[in-house]
Image (cartoon, helix red, strand yellow):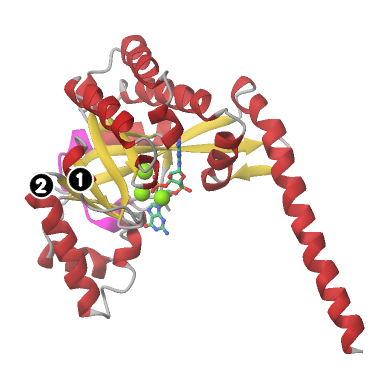
Amino acid sequence: NAKAQGKGRIQTFEDSMDADYRYRQRLKADLADAIAQNQLSLVYQPQIDLSTRRIAGCEALARWTHPELGPIRPDIFIGLAEEVGLVSAITRWVLRTAADECAQWVEPVTVSVNVSGRDLRGEGLRRDIEDALASSGLEPSRLEIEVTETALIEERSVAASRLKALAERGIGIALDDFGTGYSSLSYLNEMPFSKLKIDRSFLADIETNPRSLGLMANVARLGRDLELVVTAEGVETEEQLALIARHTEVDQIQGFLFGLPLPAAEIRELIEKMSKTGAPMSGQNWKKP
Ligand code: C2E
Ligand code: MG
Ligand code: MG
Ligand code: MG
């Protein structure tokens, strides 16, 4: 009967809440081992210059392969690492690894590293960056830090002065996922950004909705007016690419059309190939088979 069914449903719901909670607790407990036991790795997604169709930079994205649970998405484990105070250790590892791997590329392509709000407010970021640059020999101008609007909400003046010091060092500062936060736009002038990355949600229906395309074009114009490099995130189709190229002032695109995030060896080969052939390539050429 209905009552029994209802009861069953509630129990199932509670069970799954429980399972989710236990899963997250397990991951939190295992995170400390992730770095020490080499379970983290980086994949790199190319950022393509629209005018030359060449790789201008690559974004380093963290991957965690849990020995028993398999691959864990960064959207999950970065948040958990923040909760247990391990995010700065992860950032330190990512900076080191990304700088070492980028230093091996045959062209002066940049590498972008995501940092969290905790990193910005904490004490160690500057030192970790200097260590990564020193040990890899990478030029500061080859490194870019990506921050989200959400990461800048708390202790805004601390974040601003930390970022200014990095910008003065020649490091690029990208505002990531632009348009998904809820802060006012005044911080655009306070922070020393060099790049604006328009969140992929702006792209969702530009093929069918002229208003969406207009909005995208205006956001890109805002970035351009502030003299920032403007990147469109999440470009998946030739149609989206054509609309962006034709109707917006976007400088760079990043998305599955121009490549899934690739392991270090593969991205290095891709950059070598680009360097040898020198030819601009279309979306399909880059797609992983
Ligand atoms: P993000 O920085 O905005 O990175 C872009 C995310 O969008 C990546 O997901 C990427 O795989 C995905 N993506 C790229 N192109 C497309 C596309 O065309 N379509 C769709 N649907 N998705 C696309 P990923 O690797 O799962 O990372 C998710 C988020 O986790 C990142 O978003 C970033 O905020 C965070 N993250 C990743 N690595 C790190 C890290 O080392 N440190 C920190 N603090 N956060 C990280
Ligand atoms: Mg990012
Ligand atoms: Mg993003
Ligand atoms: Mg994101």
The reply to whether the magenta stretch includes residue 172 is no
Mark 1, residue position: 188
Which image quarter: residue 266?
Answer: top left
Q: Badge 1, how many Cα within 10 Å: few under 14, some, many 20+?
A: some
Pair 1/2: label in front: 1
Q: Is residue 22 left or right of residue 197?
A: right
Q: Position of residue 17 (x, y in %)?
A: 75, 58
Mark nearer the N terminus (1 vs 2): 1
Callout 2, which amino acid? Leu
Q: Residue at x 43, y 29 (%)?
A: 119
The reply to whether the magenta stretch includes residue 273 is yes
User: Is 186 located above or below residue 158 in the figure?
Assistant: below
Q: Residue at x 30, y 20 (%)?
A: 103
Label 1, secondary structure: give it: helix
Q: Is residue 116 left or right of residue 54?
A: right
> Which region is colored magenta?
272-286
User: Is 21 located above or below residue 217 in the figure?
Assistant: above
Callout 1, which amino acid? Leu
Q: Position of residue 136 (x, y in %)?
A: 34, 14
* Residues tagged 1 and 2 counted as in contact (Cβ below 8 A): yes
Q: Quadrant of the N terminus?
A: bottom right
Q: Which mark is residue 226?
A: 2
